[in-house]
Amino acid sequence: MKANGIRRTMEDNVIDIVIYAILIVVFVMTVYPFYYSLVISFNHGIDASRGGIYFWPRVFSLDNYKAVFSNHALLNGFGITISRTVIGTFATLLFTGLFAYSLSYNKLMFRTTYITLLIIAMYFSGGLIPYFILLKKLQLMNTFLVYIIPLMLNAFFTIIMMSFFRELPHELKESAKMDGASEMRIYFSIVIPISAPVFATIALFAGVEHWNSWFDAAFFVTDKDLKTISFMLMELINKANLTAVQGGGGDVERAATYAAQTFTAETIRMATMIVVIIPIICVYPFLQRYFVKGIMVGSIKG
C-alpha cells in the first residue's frame, strides 16, 4: 500500500495500530471521569449510593440539578464567578497587553530592568503573609476588586505577548506614524486587530484562571455574597454532609428532608461540578483556531 507516494511496510501498520490504541486508552482515561460525573448527576441520589453505575443513569432524575439551581448561594456564586471572569479577563488583556507592547520596544528606557524584575517576580513570590498584608494595606480585603486587581498583570502572559509584538512588521507602525497616528492609536487600531491569536490565547488562559480560582475567595474574602462557585465546589468536595451543600440558613432542615428522599451529597457534588465545568468547556471551540498559533508564535523569541 502507498500513501503520498511512500510504500508502507508491515512495521508501519503495526506502529500505527499501537499509537491509535494508546491514544484511545488515553482518551478514555481522560474523558471517562467527566462522563461518570455526568451519569451520576442525572441519577437518583439514593439509588446512586448503592453503586454499580458506570455508563448510564440507572434511575434517571433531574432532582440534583433542581437542587443546585434552587440554591441561592450557589447561584450567587455562579454570578460572582461569571462577573470576575469577564471583567478580570478584560482587565488582564488591557493592562498586560499595554505593558507587553511597551516592552516590545528596544529603545524603551530601563527596558532590561523591567524585564529582569518581571522574570524575578515570575519565579519568586513574597509568600502568603506579605501578600495578605499588601492586600490589606490596599484595602482590597473582602471586596470584589481582590479578584481583579492582583491578576491584571501576569508575568508569563507579558513575556508571551511581548514576544508576539516583537514579530510584528515595523513597517506598519512606521507608516502609521508618518500618517500622524499616536502610539495609543497604533496599538488599538493596528496592533490589536492583527494580534488576535495571542489575545485569544491569553484570554483563554486568563479566563480559565479566573474561573477555577478559589484560593483568593478562601483567604481574602469572608463575605458569603462574594464567594465564587469554585470555592463553593471546593467546599462541597471537602464536606460530606448536606448542611455544607446548602450553605446554612433557614432552609437547611427543609433541604435535608428533601435530600433524604431524592438526592445525596455525592450526587449534588457531581451536578455542581458539571454546572461549573460546562461553561468554560464551551469557550474552547471558539478560541481553538487561535490557540496553537498564538502560543507558538509568542514563544519564538521568548
Image: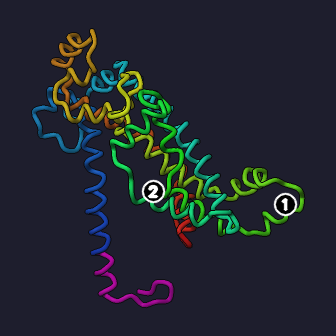
> Would you say residue 275 is visible in this rendering?
no
Q: Please tell me which residue lies in front, 123 or 168.
A: 123
Label 2 crowding class (10 Å Cα cut-off): few <14, some 14-19, many 20+? Answer: some
Find residue 167 and report its horizontal and vertical position in percent.
65, 69
Left or right, 13 with respect to 76, comes to left
Find residue 288 and report its horizontal and vertical position in percent.
52, 55
Asked if residue 76 is among those painted magenta in the image, a careful observer would answer no
Residue type, numbered disc 1: Lys
Q: Quadrant of the N terminus?
A: bottom left
The kind of secondary structure element at disc 2 is helix
Find residue 140 and report its horizontal and vertical position in percent.
46, 31
The residue that appears at 40% across and 40% down in the rendered structure is: 278
Q: Which mark is residue 163?
A: none
Picture layout, residue 129 above or below residue 188 = above
Q: Please tell me which residue lies in front, 290 or 225.
A: 225
Residue type, numbered disc 2: Ala
Q: Which mark is residue 121?
A: 2
The residue identified by callout 1 is 177
The residue that appears at 78% across and 51% down in the rendered structure is: 185
Left or right, 290 with respect to 267, comes to right
The kind of secondary structure element at disc 1 is helix
Find residue 195 and report its horizontal and vertical position in percent.
65, 58
Picture layout, residue 97 above or below residue 60 = below
